[in-house]
Amino acid sequence: MPLTEKDVRYVAELAHLDLTDEEIRKFQPQLDAILGYMQKLNQLDTTQVEPMAQVIAPGGASRPLRPDCVHESLPQEIALANAPEAGAGHFKVPSVIERE
């Protein structure tokens, strides 16, 4: 089922994007093509493929990692010093509620 303009507007709203009508017309076929490609990928037989816990970076297991050392944490006052808004010793953030 092709992606509709209503679907694009809904996704844009979820992402808090204010798209113009022209942008919606531009992105609709692009998003539809992406979803079509995902449908093709879903048709692949992956029964013999083990799930991966993480992606291995170039160099694999031989890649050197920094030692895992315990360090002193930042004091709360310093951690909150550049916060746009803080209260009760925490970062204050706007509430996120899905709109219908």
Image: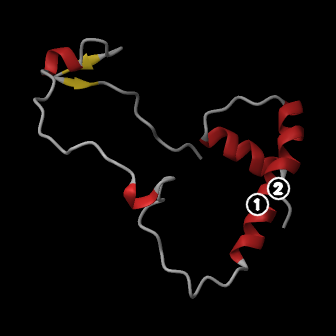
Q: Position of residue 39 (x, y in %)?
A: 75, 70
Which residue is rendered at x = 68% and y = 46% of the image? 11
| Residue assigned mark 2 | 32
Q: Is residue 31 left or right of residue 98?
A: right
Which residue is rendered at x = 25% and y = 12% of the image? 81
Residue placed most toward the observer, 99 or 78: 78
Instruction: Say whether marks 2 and 1 touch (CB < 8 Å).
Output: yes
Which residue is rendered at x = 65% and y = 39% of the image? 13
Q: Is residue 39 above or below residue 43?
A: above
Q: Amino acid at mark 1?
A: Leu
Local secondary structure at mark 2: helix
Q: Badge 1: how crowded within 10 Å, few (<14), some, or many (20+)?
A: some
Q: CA distance from mark 2 to mark 1?
A: 5 Å
Q: Is residue 2 left or right of residue 68?
A: right
Q: Position of residue 1 (x, y in %)?
A: 84, 67
| Residue assigned mark 1 | 35
Q: Is residue 39 left or right of residue 5?
A: left
In terms of image quadrants, where is residue 38? Answer: bottom right
Q: Is residue 33 left or right of residue 83?
A: right
Q: Position of residue 82 (x, y in %)?
A: 31, 12
Residue placed most toward the observer, 41 or 67: 67
Residue placed most toward the observer, 94 or 72: 72
Q: Badge 2: how crowded within 10 Å, few (<14), some, or many (20+)?
A: some
